[in-house]
Amino acid sequence: MGGRNTLFKVVLILYIGIITTNPLFGAQSLDESLTAMAFALESGRFADYLVLLTPSLREKEEGVVESYLDDLGFETISVFQTHGRKVFENKTSVYCQVLYENEYSTLIEVWHLTLIKTDGGWKIDDKQVTGTVRNLYKIRPHSTCRYRIEFQGRSRLL
């Protein structure tokens, strides 16, 4: 009987430790909510990302981010907050750069997020992709060859 009781306690302690160290658990502050969003996207936990959205935005966003990975062949997502932030009492505006990458290219989007304060913390209420989406291609020149690259009328010898 003592073995089962000890096993139960160990499992319970591990479970509580995992939940409380998860950035998605109890995200209360604005920074914690944004960190949870970045963590969910970068770790491929798209269901956790959707939980951070208001129901109306969740409907629009469902499958959008995943399509970049599945349909366009990108392998990783990175999220970076920019310095522009407007904070009001119950609403805030934040800009993030989101990079989708694979071996050959990087797609860069700038997200303008509007977050609203709810009983459980902050939720993303609106997401707009601003400007133009940029796609950068990665080149890997052969180490023993010399190349001339032209960029907007300028050339440079590598």
Image (cartoon, rainbow, N blue to C red):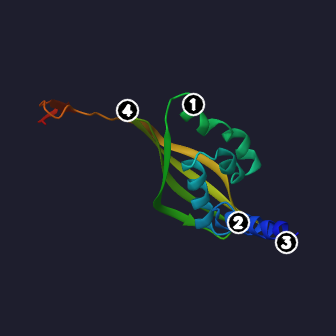
Amino acid beneath label 2: Leu
> How far apart in space, not on screen, are marks 2 and 4 (Cα)?
40 Å
Q: Is residue 51 left or right of residue 134?
A: right
The residue lying toward the viewer, choosing from 138 and 83, is 138
For the residue labelled by badge 4, is the local secondary structure a helix, a strand or a loop? loop
> How far apart in space, not on screen, are marks 1 and 3 (Cα)?
49 Å
Amino acid beneath label 3: Gly
Q: Is residue 130 left or right of residue 64?
A: left
In the image, which disc is placed on residue 14?
A: 2
Amino acid beneath label 1: Asp
Res 62 visible: yes
Q: Would you place residue 74 above or below residue 58 in this image?
A: above
For the residue labelled by badge 3, is the local secondary structure a helix, a strand or a loop? helix
**Extreme top residue here?**
71
Which residue is labeled 1 in the image? 70
Tell me which numbered mark, 4 or 1, is placed earlier along the sequence.
1
